[in-house]
Image (cartoon, helix red, strand yellow):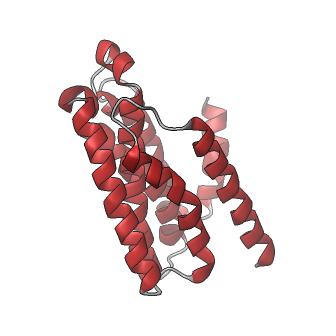
Amino acid sequence: VALILLALALPFLNFGWRGLAVYGLALLILWAYSAPPLRLKSVPGFDVVTHALFVQTFPYVIPLVLLDFAWLPFDYVIIPAFLLASTASQLEQQVRDYEVDRRTERNFTTLVGRGTSALLVKIVTTILTLHLIINIVSGIIPAQFVPFALISLPIALHRLVRGAHQPRSEWLFRVTVVTALGYAAILLIRT
């Protein structure tokens, strides 16, 4: 394990203390989220907040911090989008796993109930969708990134129309991920 952790630390060493601090924070959150005594994934509220801050958002912020980039208007739009998307995703997962989780551990959804979390998924998804539409129309989100929003639209619509006890469509989720990765590859090749 120590050798793996050291190997993973090597790219961060290029950035000196800042890189080590980012790497250390990532390890700390990984440990705090999953392991006793904190095990934040079992602390209602902290489970959702930790997911929102570190699953999609933190990986986007790391290069901005390590490369000392000036933040652009797009960054100020995409970071809240990642926070909202990650929050909706975590709540959606907890709604899906509610029956098992309520017998085996505590989390936000076992505390507030499946119906409340399902409603929050719809609210957060609506806010995220409006946030993206406003920033696409205003031109802050560049045209080449608009297809990502369109690719994600069927999942957002599915979240809005399905019932609290209906699980997400795994088929739709997989198609969305593959399509988004394919489009990302196209963008990468074109640049």
Work out whether 22 lies above or below 144.
above
**Quadrant location of the C terminus?**
bottom right
Where is residue 59? Give x, y as percent. Answer: 51, 57
Where is residue 82? Give x, y as percent. Answer: 43, 60
Residue at 42% across / 74% down in the picture? 133
Say how many tags the image has. Answer: 0
91 left or right of 156 in image: left
Of residue 71 and residue 164, the one placed in the foreground of this image is 164
Of residue 52 and residue 26, the one placed in the foreground of this image is 52
Of residue 128 and residue 37, the one placed in the foreground of this image is 128
Work out whether 146 lies above or below 162.
below
Residue at 40% across / 41% down in the picture? 162
Asked if residue 72 can be seen in this view, the reply is no
**Quadrant location of the N terminus?**
top right
Of residue 27 and residue 96, the one placed in the foreground of this image is 96
173 left or right of 114 in image: right
114 left or right of 128 in image: left
176 left or right of 185 in image: left
Where is residue 40? Give x, y as percent. Answer: 31, 33
Work out whether 52 lies above or below 30.
below
Residue at 59% across / 82% down in the picture? 143
Where is residue 25? Give x, y as percent. Answer: 42, 49
Task: Say which quarter of the image contains residue 108.
Answer: top left
Q: Name the outermost residue toward the top.
A: 103
Task: Say which quarter of the image contains residue 72.
Answer: bottom left
